[in-house]
Amino acid sequence: MASLTPDSEVRLTVSRCLRSLSSSPDGEDAAAALRTLGSHLDDGAEGSTPAAQRAEFRRSHYTRTLRCLVANVQADWLLRLEAGRRAELWDALFLRGPPDQALLVLLQAVQELRAATAGLDLLVAVTEEFLRRGRLDELLWSYCPGAAPPDSAHLRETLLGRLGALPDLLANTLRHDNRELFLPRRYYPLLASAMAAALERTCQALRDGRDCSLTFVAQTLGKVCVQGHGGLVFAALAPRLSSCTRSDVLWQRVCWKLLENVPQRWMESVITGLVQAVTGPDALGRILGNLVLTNKQAQFVVTHKLLLLQYKYETRVLRSVLGYLAADGGRRPLLVQVVRSVSQAWANPSAVKHTALEQQLYVTKALLLSVGLLRDGERQELRSELLQCLLGGMQSRLDSGVPRIRRLGMVVGESLSRCIDVDGAKLEFQYDRDEETRELLSLATPDTRDEPEPVDGPHSLQETSETAPPTDSPSPQDESVNAEPESDLDSDDELTPYDMSADREASQASPPRYLRDCLESLMSSEDSLRVELSLRASETLVRRNVFAAREVSGQMCKVLLHMENKFNIAGFLALRHAAMVALAVADCVPVTQYLTAEFYSLNYSLRQRLDILEVLAAAAQELSRPIPEPRDPASGVDSAPPDPGDGPEHWRRVVEKRVQSKTRLLSKKGTRRPAAPGAPNRYAPVAGHFFFPLLRNYDKPQVTFDLLGSDQLVLGRFVHTLGLLMHLAVNAPVASQMGCALLDFVWTVRYHSDQMVRRGVLFAVCSVFLSMPSHNLLVDLNERLFETRAWLADVAESDPDADCRSLAVQSLVLLDQSVKKQLQDPQALSLDS
């Protein structure tokens, strides 16, 4: 009979052993079969099985063997084996063979055995021992040599998924019985150490002249990072790479090759985790190399995404990224590109209004750091961009109403003025130096060290500029001290200077005296001085001659609404607003009808719609205030001469006032002041003209305006304006109808995602409860009060915004007071009954 080939012989031996294990053998037969299978995993020349058969077993029969063992994990012969013999015979088959095949079989078996059994405990124990013995190191290294084990793309993708999600897979199965080693905080540092071990063996193999591939290690790193565990991995891996690359060029090349082999779809996660873990730009440069010059995805992440799109990172991450770009001559063009993009983003005026304050602070730090790393030639190249950033961005922030945003503009203005040196002049502002501003001022000094070191050299540029006076612009005190003695002979210090603070430049044009001339200038004049004088005089002319204002109110309101500040008039917005408010007060009904109709019209910007709301709110407030009397009888001053016929009454009044002035009243409650005289409310008769047309078309989205959709800023101001109009209509006959309509409207947006809108809704609800009579509140809104109270209680308890919770509590108090007051009124109770 011809001798069998190694393939056939191994196939027959393995089939015989597996058949013996599957046929319920006794302990000795099972041990002999396990020992025979284990002999095919012996290493070295002392093994009893030939090397060719061992290689064939590992390649073609190892996975089949493990699956048979897992299928018989509940067999009686296995449970009867002693712990020592089981570890020697059964466990060794999982721990001595190809690690990738063993890990896949173990994880699949653990997932299939979801019930808590002895077999599951055995498989979990073997898996834990697999990790403890460093089999992950062998697994990663097995794919590194030039002759890596052949595998399919599907098998490699499956293995990558198991390696990256091993804690999740085991946690889903073991639940509360999970082991400590399988937790993410223990497993991923262990995987990171396995990667470091594979890289170290790769360096040794390259020194020995052998070829290696880091593709699988790079894919494993990318898979773990994209699943959100990059922080745990790089917390253990980055210090090791930084230490090894400090003095070994081969280690640097291995790290560069590792990151080059990371797939593009996982590059962002890897770089993000790396820049957060390294200690500085030098370490980042040694590990990352010039990857940003060869990989477009890495370049986009480093130069754009980490600086402009994401703002959750600490300042040291910005120092590392920008210092990395500035450390090498080949990467410095990217630093110039970063300065351009960051300065444009910082100078964008819309960013001040539509981005979070944290993001503005983050971009400000990036701008100061990047500008501080520029050289003199690069600053001259970027002088125009920096000047535009200084003028545009600083002005936008100084106009903001938020103090922190204004301080950002001041700090950047000071720093950029020192960098670009405009005509030797440097900006200086007065503001509070808190911790945030001190940090921003320190960012202008480049600090590229990995570790904090003692400062032995000269002070930083920022400290020098703060302590030493500038040499190019000496102070007046220095000039007076350094002046020559002869200059004192002709000094004019003894002469008293003439006060010219109130002097004004003589104007060639005069302000208009008539309202129609003013309107004509605003409509068609191209003279900037004439337009400015007309705009400044428009409010006075409207209030001085109400009858003339009513003739041109509609046309003038239209001109002011569409007017632009093309002549850069100081205080343009305030002047235009005051003139439109004066028109709305002088000719209330036509102007409010025009403004409320134009609010929903096409081809208006959001700024113009906000202007309309501000004008309506201001006009309603002015109309609701009492009209001042030209004469005050209580003051005792009478401009007209006394009538001779009224002599006795006048004499008695004078005597009575003298007696009251000399009489001292003693009372525990104090003297009572007379009540203020009543005055008619001009807003009450026209409240409906303000309110109902403005609420008419809110649910009709236009081409350029979607009130209930994307235009949340206008919606928030819109709801606040409606609440103000409702609040000013207290005691008005139309207050009940306004309250019902307003409550119906806010009910549709009460769960809006924007906190500004929710605040407006709660303010409007408070206004309804304050302005509507208690009886009408219970009668007209009886069916909705219970649901409204439940909603307010939920907002007061669970809304994330503190102001919303406070407004909800106030609304609940007002509602309860109104209900209690109405229930205590016997006349109301009789009417209700």
Image (tube, rainbow, N blue to C red):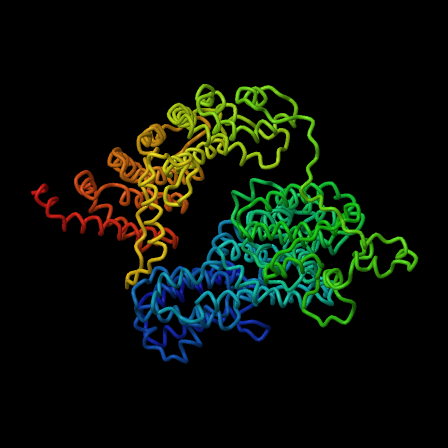
Query: Front-most of 96 and 535?
Result: 535
Q: Is residue 583 above or below residue 354?
A: above
- How far across and down, in percent of the image, does residue 228 sit? 49, 56
Say which quarter of the image contains residue 748. top left
Quarter the C terminus occupies: top left
Rendered residue at 41%/40% (across/down): 716
Could you tell me how many numbered marks the image carries? Answer: 0
- How far across and down, in percent of the image, does residue 827 sit? 11, 44
Query: Front-most of 599 and 632?
Result: 632
Say which quarter of the image contains residue 172. bottom left
Taking the image as shown, residue 248 lies to the left or right of residue 363, namely right
Most distant residue in the right direction? 486
Taking the image as shown, residue 819 lies to the left or right of residue 212, namely left
Q: Is residue 330 above or below residue 831?
A: below
Query: Front-most of 749 and 780?
Result: 780
Q: Is residue 53 above or below residue 718?
A: below
Rendered residue at 21%/42% (across/down): 777
Q: Is residue 213 visible?
A: no
